Structure formats: structure tokens, C-alpha cells
Amino acid sequence: MPEIVDRVAAMVDYTLDTIVGPKSKNLKVKDPKKYAFEPKTLLSEFIDIYLNLGVSERFIEAVARDGRSYKPENFNNASRILSRFSIRSNEDLAAFEALKERFKIAKEIDDQDEGDLGEIPDEFEDPILATLMEDPVILPISQQTVDRNLKERIIKWKAEKREQAKNARATATAEKMDVTEG
């Protein structure tokens, strides 16, 4: 469901950060067998989630857009662990490497897009996630009403900002190429 893609991506990114990130050394229990605590198996299962959901371009974009927990070094650490302990097949490792590259490209595109848009007007920013809203709705608890026409205004604003950035880049490129004397 498109409504939850960003949240799922944030959840798996956060969990991957917990499993292989800087704080992973804190993941210890006194009796791992008693609690069925197997970090390598857990990592393998989360790689399954990435590989299965990685067929969706929207998921790829959502992972890369996750400003809180998306960290390329976590994916590199996961690859290193998977390879070092032969947790996954060579085919799975290759698929994961290709997926990591797709995340990297999506992040570069998202960063460029964010730079093109500049500062987001307060009325377009999600008050909870501090991100640009894509489909504003009524909040269930507060019953705060957000005009559905705001969506069209956001789309228009994004298109205008992207066009301005595109024109600015084209102008800058043309100025660099201008070698006329005078």
C-alpha cells in the first residue's frame, strides 16, 4: 500500500542500523538460546525484506529518502557480515549489491531534487516527519482538516521549483560553454 511505504522503509532502515550500525555492539543478551536471539539470522531476514520489497521503485525511493536511518555504511556493514559468515548465497549477495547501488542512485536523485526545491513552505511540510507532504489528509485524532486542494498546490510548487532549477542549471552550463571573445 503506497500509504505505508515510507514507514516500512524507515522501520527496516532503523532496524538495520540497530543490527549492523555503531550501536550493534549493545545487542547482547546473557542467554541468547533462551531468547532465541540470533543476530545473523535476524540480519538475513531483514535482507530478505529489502530484496523482496526492492522490486518496487517506490520502496527504493523511500529507503533512500529516509533521512533518519538510511546510511550507506549500514548496507556495506551488512554485506561484509553476510559475506564473512557465508550467511547468504553468492546470488543473494549480488542481488543485494545491485540493490545497494539502486539505493545510492535514488539518494543522489533525491538530494538533487531536494536542492532544487529549496526551502519547503511551512504549510507544505508534514508537522510530524518534517518532510514535504505528498497527499495531505485529515489527521484522525486532532481532526485537523487539510484542504485536499493543497495537494495540487504542492505538485504545482514542486514543478515550478524544479523548472527554475533546471533553467538555472541550463543557464550556468551555457555560460560555462560561452567562449566568444568580447
Image (tube, rainbow, N blue to C red):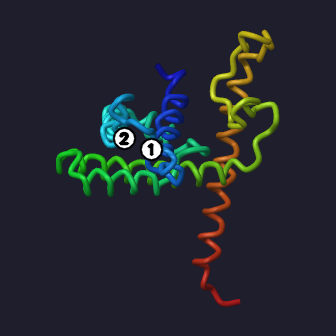
Q: What residue is shown at x 21% (from left), y 51% (from top)?
A: 86
Residue position for label 1 = 19
**Mark 2 residue type:** Pro
Residue 12 location, x and y as percent? 46, 35
**What is the residue that sits farthest to the bottom in this orientation?**
181
Q: Quadrant of the C terminus?
A: bottom right
For this view, does 91 lie left or right of residue 144?
A: left
Label 1: state its secondary structure.
helix
52 and 81: which one is in front?
A: 81
**What is the residue that sits farthest to the left in this orientation?**
90
Residue position for label 2 = 39
Residue 37 location, x and y as percent? 37, 34
Instruction: Note whether 148 is above or below 26 in the view shown.
Output: above
Q: What residue is shown at x 55% (from left), y 29% (from top)?
A: 7
For this view, does 136 lie left or right of residue 62?
A: right
For this view, does 41 lie left or right of residue 69?
A: left
Q: What residue is shown at x 67% (from left), y 60% (from top)?
A: 168
